[in-house]
Image (cartoon, rainbow, N blue to C red):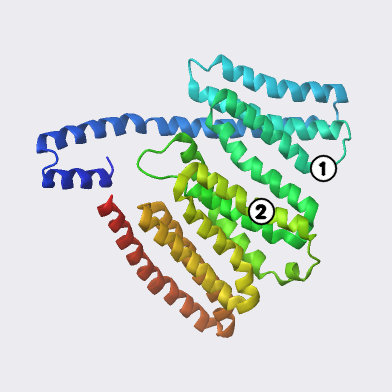
Amino acid sequence: MSDDLSHRLARWAAAGVIDAETAQRITAFEREHASRSGLRWPVLIALAFGALLLASGVLLFVAAHWDTMSPASRVALVLLLVASFHMAGALVGERFPGMSSALHGVGTAALGAGIFLAGQIFNLDEHWPGGVMLWAVGAALAWVVLRQLPQLALVAVLAPAWLAGEWMVAAGWSAAGVMATGLFTLALAYFTGRRGSHVSRVQLVLWWIGGVALAPAGVYLAAMAADRAIHGRPEARALLLTVGWVVAVGAPLAVAAALRGERAWMNALAAAWAVLIFTVHRVGGEAALYGWCALGAVGLVAWGVHEVRRERINMGAALFALTILAFYFSNVMDKLGRSASLIGLGVLFLAGGWALERVRRRLVQQTREVG
């Protein structure tokens, strides 16, 4: 049983909301339930890795024998891969739902490989974002029919990948900042979609994707803002650039509104921070950019405190520490000698890490008391 629930039960018993006997029954029930549900994690991990290894092995086998196969054999193999995994998932659906979900997920992944291989077989015009779009549509249809999490995860990843690909083909690197802004705000919308104690499966999957993608997307956004070469390239057409900014900001805000409802106004503030990062760098230079990134990390921490979400506090603290380290390596370390720079880095890790951890623990404890 989690320490958070134990703390709540103790507080409720002390306040007279529940008696000691009821608290003991709740504790016994939660411990028994936790022990039973804990046995599922090894099975889920085994299914996830098994599906990943199976898909990788099939793709490697096809790639090794691809050149020796005739075009008709290639088409038949592509269709067989997609159909066989979905048929196997349907056969074991009632007896082993977890296995069924894994097999359907492999089948949906094989669909993407089939789309691109079919384009290679028939020498179709090369426009790779179109293939990603077809893959995303297929995953979306599979999600509508099956309502399984692998298809939802693929849609959440493939849809922005398609939009990013179309943007790069249409505008090129001259407007890469638009794509960076869209990816960051979308990852933030995924990550902040959880609210309250009751979390749906959709929110949980998007939360995991956003948590994994948020830090890399933030680093990419800061790198695009600091890239002077991009600012010096010819700009895209005004109309195309306007459409790009509308989609990069509007689509993530629509996702945030669907997940958070009226609380999506906080995502709008975060989107404004992401858009202004380019202006901050042009006006204030590199030092202002680091300050703006640190401000964004502090804002994420404050967001977590306001909505009693510990994962946002932890993520904000990690991003703040990453900003400080990046500033030290790029602006401080090269101005010191080798020994002095190492000493300073050690002091930064020890003192800064200690202070940051104290603040993080205090804020996390505050959210537990409020919750």
Nearest the eye: 33 or 232: 232
Nearest the eye: 233 or 126: 233
Q: Name the residue located 17 percent from the left edge and 47 percent from the top edge.
A: 11
Q: Give me the disc on residue 306.
A: none
* Foreground label between 1 and 2: 2
Q: Name the residue located 27 percent from the left edge and 40 percent from the top edge.
A: 1
**Residue bearing mark 1:** 127
> Left or right: 204 with respect to 121?
left
> Left or right: 309 with respect to 136?
left
Tell me the amino acid under the disc marked 2.
Answer: Val
Query: Which mark sits nearer the N-terminus, 1 or 2?
Result: 1
**Residue bearing mark 2:** 246
Q: Name the residue located 29 percent from the left edge and 30 percent from the top edge.
A: 33
Q: Secondary structure at mark 1?
A: loop
Nearest the eye: 85 or 185: 185
Q: Report x, y in % for residue 182.
A: 63, 54
Q: Secondary structure at mark 2?
A: helix
